[in-house]
Amino acid sequence: MTANVKTWKELFSEVIEAGLCTLCGACSGFCPYLTYYKGRIVAVENCARNGDAQCYGYCPRTYTDLDALSQTVFASRYDEAPIGFAKDVVIARSTDIAVRARSQYGGVVTTVLTFALERGLIDSIIMAKTLPDKTLRPFLAWSAEDVVQCAGSNYMACPVLEGYNQIAKNSGNGNKLAIVATPCQVLAITKMKHKPPQNRSNINDIKLVIGLFCTWALSPDRFHRFLRENLDLAEIVKFDIPPPPSNRFDVYTKSGVVSFPLEQIRQFTMPACAYCFDMTSEFADISVGAAEGIEGWNTVIIRTDSGNELWQLILAEGKVEVNELPLQNLGHLKEAALLKKRRAISELRKKSGNVNNLLYMGLPPGLADKLIA
Amino acid sequence: MSGIAIDAPGTSQLFIGNEAIARGALEAGVGFAAAYPGTPSSEIIGSLAQVAKEAGIYVEWSVNEIVALEAAAGASFAGIRALAAMKQNGVNVASDFLANLVMSGTGRGGLLLIHCDDPSAISSSNEQDTRPIAKWLDIPLVEPGDFQEAKDMTKWLFDLSEELGTICLLRSVTRIAHARGNVKLGELPKVKPKAYFDQTHDLKNVMPTKYIPVPSPVRHFFQHMKLNRAREKFEIAPFNRYVGPQNPELLLITCGSCWLYSLDAVKALKLEDRVGILKLGTIWPLPEKFLEQYVTKAPKILFVEEIDPFLEQSVMELIAGLTSLDHYPVFYGKRSGHLNAYGELNPDMVIKAISNILGLTYQPRPVEYSSQAESFRKSHVPERSMTFCPGCPHRATFWAIKNALKLDGRNGFVTGDIGCYSMAIGPAGFFQVRTMHCMGAGAGIANGLGRLGQFGFDQPVLAVVGDSTFYHATIPALVNGIYNQSNFILVILDNSATAMTGFQPHPGTGITAMGEPTKVVSMEALCRSLGARVEVCDPFDLKATTATLLDMMTEGGGAKVIIMRRECELVRSKKQDAPYKVYVDQDKCIGEDCGCDRLCTRVFLCPGLVWDKKAGKSRIDEVICAGCGVCADICPRGAIVKEAR
C-alpha cells in the first residue's frame, strides 16, 4: 500500500469531515458501507479494501482535473469562461401552459425530458423528488407523469447520484438514462464518464445530463427541521425565491404564501457550497436555470453536440419558445458565475492555507490567478 | 427421557450429576421443586419435571431464583420436602431471602438449596465460588465428590434439614453436574405427604408456629446451635474419608470434583504410600474432630479445591486453634501459589503442585508427542468462532441495531447482560454490546446512563435483554425508567424460549415446566400498562426494524420498549422446514471488489455463508444454511437469492 492509495477513510478525512461534502450521492447507495441519512454520509461499517476506492475517485470534492474532463466532454481546454463551454445561451419556455403552471420557471426541464421520453431517446430519468414529508429522495422517473411529479425545487440538497448507483442492482444495464443534476452532481457524473466505474450500471447508459443552475443548496437536515418547526409540512405546496431585490424566501401553502427573509434561510445553506466554483453545471449537455428578471422563462445553455441535437429537435417540434438572452442579462449571469468561482478559489486557498493548493479544484496552471484578477 | 424415576432399588443407572441429585431428591420424597434455569444446574429441575406427573410431585420453572427459593420455602412451611436449584448467580439473586430464612427457620418439610458453580465461567457471565455463603449466613453445606454421593447426599441432607429445622446447601460444580457415572439406586417412597400449614402451638417454642426472623439476635443464636448440631452429624458423616498411609509426607485436603483429580494425580505419580488424601463431603461447618486426626499427622498439607481457598482458609483457622499441635504443618495451595484461585483445576495441575512440593519431575508423555499432537490438532480442526446459529434472529437484530446507531450518528451504544445475545460483544453481534453483567443489568445500567442529560450526555442507550431475562430481572428496571423518566430503549430479544440454557419455557410461552398449557404473560401488554411506548418488530425485516429503532431514538423522552419477536431457530427448525432456498448468483457476486468487499462473509458472518477463495465469490453452505433469507436482504448486489420453498 502506497501513501497515495485513497480509501473511504480519506474520503472522510479529506471531504466529509473537512466540510466539503455536497451530499451529491456519488459515494452512497452503491456499496453497503456508505449510506446517506438525514443530511449526512454515514459509514455504517468499515470497508477493508486498500485502494481503488470508487467512493473517493468519483467524489466531486476530491482532486478533479478540470482540463481533462473538459477534453473528455467538449474536446476543448478548460478556460476562464465563467459559464463554461457553451454552444448557445438562450431564454426559453415551454409552449405547454399546463407544464409552465406546474414548473418553477419556464418548464424547460420538464419539456426536454418529456420530449426525450416520448421519442424513446431515453427510458428513464434519475431526478430528485419531493416526498410528502418534504424531504427529497432520488427517483427514477419512467413517464411524463413521473417527471411532472418531480417538477419544482425545494432548494435542499439531495443525493441524486444514489439513484444512478442503485440502478445496477435494481433495474440493470441497458436502460437509456437521463439525469437532472446540480453542478456538483454533474461534476461527479463527468468524472465517471472520464473513467467508467466498475460494478455500477454502464455510465454510457446516461444519454442526457441536464444540469441545473445552483448558487447554494439548503441543508436537508437543518432546513427541514426549520420547516417542521415553523410550518405544517402537509400544507406546503412549493417554494420560491423571487428575483432581487425581494430578498424573500416564499413558501406556498394550501392556505397562502408564508414569506421568510432570505437572510434567515441562508443560515441553512450547506457550508460546503462556499467551495463550489460552478454555478451553471458546466459539464452538462444542457444547463437550465432561472432567467433573472424575465418571469416565467428559463435561461438555457446548450453545451454538447448531443445536447444541441436534442435541443434542435425540440425547437423543430415547437415544444419550446425561444428568445435571445438580452446582453445585459448575459452579463449578469457571467458576473454571478465568476463571483462564485472567485469565492470558491479564495475559500479553498484559505482552507488549504496555500495559494497554490485549491484542494479538489484542479485548474490548469495560471487559471486561478486569471479568474481572481 | 430421564430414567431418574426407575423403581429398581439396588440396580445401577448411568446418571449425570444433576440427575443423581434429582434421583436423591425423589428417594427422599421431595414434593416440590422449583428453579430458574442456569448452567450447570438446569437438568436437576429438567429431569424432575419430566417425571413429575409419574412421581406425583410438583415441579416448576420459576420466574427467577429468589421466587423459586421462596416458593420452595412455602412448601416446606406446609410440611412438604422441597428444593430450589440454581447456578452461582442464582444464589446472589436469592440471597436476601436466604439470609432471612436462616433466621426464621424452615418448616416441617426439609428444604435444600442446590447451587451449581461454574468454575472458569464456561457458561456464565462471572466466576464465583458460592461456598462462602454457608459461612457468611451460617448454613450447613455439603458437596458431593462423585455421582453416587450426589444422590446419597441429597437424600441424607433432607433428613438433616428436617431434623435441624434449617435450610441446607448442596454445592456442585460443572464437572459433577454434567459428567456421567454409575449410581446405585435406593428405594422410592410410597407414601405421599399431605400439605398443611400448621398454626397450632409448637410445644418446643410455646408459641404458635410463625416463620419470622425476629427477634434476630435470638434467632441468630439458635442458628449457631443448629450449626453445632450439624457439626456433630458431620463428624460421623459417611461423606468424609481418608485414603493413604498412616503418616503421610503430604496430605491433600480436597472436596468436590477435585477429589477425583487428587486420586488420579496421586496414582499417576505412584505416591499412594507417601501421600494421603482427605476428602471432605461436609464443607461447613467443618467436622473439626475428624479433621484433627489427620492434620496433626502430616508435615505438609496441600489444599486441592476449585476457585476460592475456602477449605484452605477454614482449615488453617481451625489448626490455628488446635492446642494439641507442637508445630504447624507447612500449608500449600492457593496462598502459596501452587494452585490457582481461579478457573477449573484438572489432574495435571494437581500433579504439578504435588511434584513441585515434593521435588519430583513428572512427564506424562514425551514432549515431542505433545507438540506433534498440538500441531496435528491445529491443522485438522477448523477454527470456529463463538457465533449465533445460522438463522438466529439475534444476528438480524444486532445488524439493525448497528446500522440504526450508526445512522443516528450520536455514538449510541448497547448495554447488555448474559444470554445467547452476550455473543454480541464479539463479531457475531458486530461488537455492539458494550456492557455485560448479571441478568437484567443492562437495563439497570441504562437507567443511570439515560439520566445524564444534565451533564451533556446525549448518546442513545439501548439495553438488550432476552425474553426470559425480561421476566426474571428487568421489570423493576423498566418501572424505574418510566417512573424516573430515564431516556433509554429496552430491546427485548423475544425468541420465545430460554434458549441459552436449553429452551426451557417461561411466562411468555404459555407452557409450564411440567408441559401443561398456562396463561401467557404478554410482555407488550405488561409494558404498555406501565405507560411505555411499545413497538413489536420482526428482526428479519431489517428495514422496518432499523427505521423503528431510529424513530424511537429520535423521539427521546422516558424509557421505551421494542420487542424483537422471532422464534429461536433451533426451536423453529424442529417444527418446520426452512422457509427459503437460498443461493448465491455467481455472476452477480462481486466478492472482494469495490462495492461489496465480502460484506456477507467478512462482516455479516452467518456460518451458512462461505467464502470460496478460488472463485473469489461467496457461496451458501447448504448443509448449514437455515434458509432464513436475511442475507439476501443485506447483499449490496442482489447476488444472494432467496426462493420461497
Image (cartoon, coloured by chain):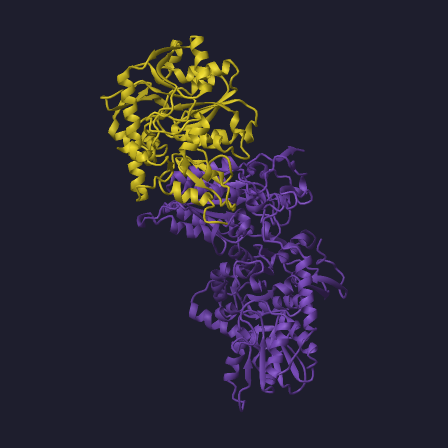
Chain colours: A yellow, B purple
For the C terminus of chain A, the quadrant is top left
Left or right of B23 in this view: B527:
left
Name the residue located 46 percent from the left edge and 38 percent from the top edge: A57
Residue A15, image x, y percentages: 39, 40
Query: Does residue A344 sit above or below B366 in this rendering?
Result: above
Residue B145 occupies quadrant: bottom right
Is residue B526 visible in the rendered image? The answer is no
Image label count? 0
Name the residue located 39 percent from the left edge and 16 percent from the top edge: A108
In the foreground, B221 or A282: A282
Residue A259 occupies quadrant: top left
In the foreground, B463 or A270: A270
Residue B555, image x, y percentages: 39, 38
Residue B560, image x, y percentages: 43, 42
Name the residue located 54 percent from the left edge and 79 percent from the top edge: B315
In the foreground, A373 or A283: A373
Query: Does residue B506 sit above or below B187 in this rendering?
Result: above
